Image (cartoon, rainbow, N blue to C red):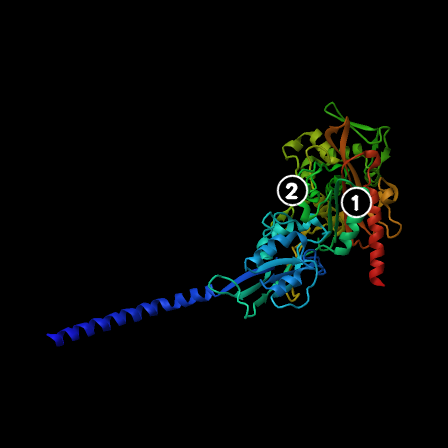
Amino acid sequence: MQKRTVVAFSTMLLMLCGIMLRVYQLTSGSLAQAADQQASMTVQVASARGTIYDRNLVPLVNTEKEYRAAVAPTSEAVAALSDCLMESQQETVLDRLQKGQPAVALLSGLTPPTEGISLVSAPVRYGKTVLAPHVVGYLSGDGINGAAGIEQAYNDWLNACGGEATVTYSADAMGKPLQDTDPKLVNTLDNAKAGVVLTLDADIQKITERVAKNYIQKGAVLVMEPSSGQILSMVSLPDYQPDTVAESLENEDSPLLNRALCNYNCGSVFKIVSAAAALEAGVSTEYSYTCTGKYSIEELNFHCHNRLGHGQLNMLQAFGKSCNPYFINLMQQVGGEKLYDMAVTLGFDRPIVLAEGLKTARAVLPTEEDLRSPAEVANLSFGQGSLLATPVHMAQLVGTVVNGGELVRPTLYRGTVDKDGILQEAAPTAPQHAFSENTAAILRQMMAYTIEEGTGTKAKPIEGGAGAKTGTAETGWEEDGQEVIQSWIAGYYPAEDPQYVIVVLEEDADESAAHTSDVFKQLCEEFCMLEKEKSE
């Protein structure tokens, strides 16, 4: 009996040991992991999104640095912070240290090498002044995701290119850093050197911003390389800075609006399209018409800006003098269908995609049915009526003239770059045929004549010559008893082998004191000086 009891007890003991062994095997891994987690703590010292660059890999963000530190709760570390801890952070940082917890601090300068302080140099997303703020955009309130511009359009990629600096401490059971072990710093902030490369040229952008602000309060200026469609500068006024967006939200002049991407009444700049339609329809440049100061259709009187009339004109003269009755008469001969088709070919019925997720407003044309009305054709012939387009559409139009009738789509996107500076360039879009080389050559002759002897003489640069078309667009609404107009000039520089397409829009301008030609002239001259400096 006693022997059987011993055997039974031994068997039960062996079974219990087996169960305990199995439980240990099943739980030992998770228990060890939990122990490891309890034995360390990690704090993030700094983080950075991928960088936005100009065409020459000049950074437009992450251009400045700041010192950030993870600070262990030691007397030596606290003493070292006394001279460089930002005043705004003193209460929060010292409170954590007094509780025995590590703290992250923004420093006003370098600290001497001190045990307990892990120091990193971190990029600041936006410096005091950011070039091309409307293109770059800004971050949402969380400071993590883009809310406008390239920041928003390439948000996922810029986040994927990000980096961070973290410090891991060995900790006791209470979660307090151990004094006798060194923290581990992991710094991947250099990964944020990867990012997006734009077509903007920082030097040209600086010039464009400075010149535009000298003359214009509200409007937009665009500079484009015609051969590639790459936008070299884009300015919208008034502007803002990405780190002070909140200050702009209540501004009545809407500084957050990128006016270069917005629709406006076009005016006589659209006569480039009308002239192209006529030339492609076989109308000779010698086609003449006598302007008496007005043109009447269906009991409607369309007036010329010269109320006394220009007299007899051919197409070159009418273009240079911007004679409305001539172009109304011309388009009555050509027909609304051909004018509409040319406008569609040149993109005046759609938005222009400048980069993935970033595009202009959709340009607005009267419908084909509308253009069965001679009065609608008359309005469209000199850029009035329901026609609306953006400065980018005008740059595309002038670029097509410069490129011999081949339409090259404007773009702001050049490609991506990795943290080692290796550029992955985007494939260019294929040009589309819009009109013949002969038509393009005649249009360039007309635009050069406008600068030399027509309405654009004020825009003539000191050297190099240029070609352009001016425009004054009626909006149909008034402010303080005066009609609001939009003033335009769209052209190219220099006259021979043009390297720049320049479009200037002054919003709500006073017709007698518009500054678009002043901006165009000064930009041409400064670009000329820039080219000379580069060649030297």
- Residue 345, horizontal then vertical, whole percent: 67, 45
| Up-down relation of residue 520 to residue 81 (above or below) | above
18 and 171: which one is in front? 171
Kindly state the secondary structure of the residue where label 2 is placed: loop
Res 379 label:
none
- Residue 21, horizontal then vertical, whole percent: 30, 71
Residue at coordinates 63% horizontally, 58% vertically from top-left? 105
| Up-down relation of residue 160 to residue 273 (above or below) | below
Kindly state the secondary structure of the residue where label 1 is placed: helix
| Up-down relation of residue 267 to residue 91 (above or below) | above
Q: Which residue is mark 1?
A: 213
Q: Which residue is most to the bottom? A: 3
Is residue 196 something that shows in the picture? no
Decide which of tag 1 and tag 2 comes sooner along the chain. Answer: 1
What is the quadrant of residue 179 in the picture? bottom right
What is the quadrant of residue 481 in the picture? top right
Q: Amino acid at mark 1?
A: Lys
- Residue 26, horizontal then vertical, whole percent: 34, 67
Q: Which residue is mark 2?
A: 361
Q: Are marks 1 and 2 in contact (CB under 8 Å)?
A: no
The C terminus sits in image quarter = bottom right
The N terminus sits in image quarter = bottom left
Q: Amino acid at mark 2?
A: Ala
Residue at coordinates 58% horizontally, 66% vertically from top-left? 186
Q: Residues within 10 Å of mark 2 (few under 14, many from 20)?
A: some
Q: Which residue is most to the left? A: 1
421 and 358: which one is in front? 421
295 and 216: which one is in front? 216
